[in-house]
Image (cartoon, grey):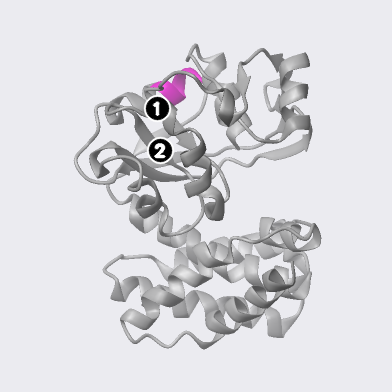
Amino acid sequence: MGGLIGGSLSEGGADVTLIDVNAEHVDALRQNGLKLKTDKGERYIPIPVLFPWEVSKTYDLIIVFTKTMHTTSAIAAIRSAIDANTVLLSLQNGLDNKLSLMEFVDQKNIMVGITTYPADMKGPGCVESHGEGIVRLASASAAPPLLDYMPGLFARGDMKAIIDPQVEVAIWEKVIFNAALNGLCAVTRSTVGQIGAHADTRELAFQIIGELCATAHACGFAVQGERIEKTVSEALEQHSSHKPSMLQDVLAERPTEIEAICGAAVRRAEEHNIPVPVTRTILGLVRHIDWHL
């Protein structure tokens, strides 16, 4: 996702630097530029890329795409890139990203959001994305100076972005969607279509939606259960071969983002005495898988 958005913003004239720890990926970017495949075609985009320890200047905006469990260590590694005016934007999965960013900047310098743009890394230096999407974002508190600038910044890169005062609702709805499918796919090692093809696993997915909608409502967020159910149903029918990121992590024996998704949701359910037995079970099973890594 960082390659897609970084490359698109660079094409739109923004001064972009990619920061990564994957040596093979960094080497490919330095040798060939970013190979970006979208509906506009295939092209190579020359774009600066650094390892964290090579960062030597500060930036106006840092967009964070790391897995949630790496957020603190990743930003700590580029602390020298942050000054009093730097704004951090998280477009990551999960509920607690704002809290992680507050370890490094004031809340007024934080933006949070979600994106529905698809992105797949096809190999070192190569990112592919097809179809429509949107970036929804808002400030974590008082609007930082860059907030009003963001839709135009993305538009120049041929991407749609909107300022959404209800972005926390969108974040919750994405968490519920991910909790309903990612965990089940990871535990059963099944594709989305395989979950949808079996009545029991399909029902479990919708039970998770019900549990976490109740949790979100108790937390004061007006998520729309019917909208989430429709989105999940469409995924079960239309993306039958898709392997969610959590399943990919399990198959590759990498740590998952279960804590940022199901873990954070279960903690909030406990705070409001909302029963979430199915979500809690999925959380425990994926924790067990992570424990083996």
Q: Using the image, determine if residue 136 lies above or below residue 202.
A: above
Q: Quadrant of the N terminus?
A: top right
Q: Using the image, determine if residue 25 lies above or below residue 290.
A: above
Q: Nearer the viewer, residue 150 or 193?
A: 150
Which mark is drawn over residue 266?
Answer: none
N-term-proximal mark, 1 vs 2:
1
Which mark is drawn over residue 89?
Answer: 2
Q: Nearer the viewer, residue 267 or 185?
A: 267
Residue 118 part of the magenta segment: no
Whole-percent x and y of residue 97?
A: 42, 52
Q: Secondary structure at mark 1?
A: strand
Q: Are marks 1 and 2 in contact (CB under 8 Å)?
A: yes
Tell me the amino acid under the disc marked 2: Leu
The magenta segment is: 153-157
Which mark is drawn over residue 61?
Answer: 1
Tell me the amino acid under the disc marked 1: Leu
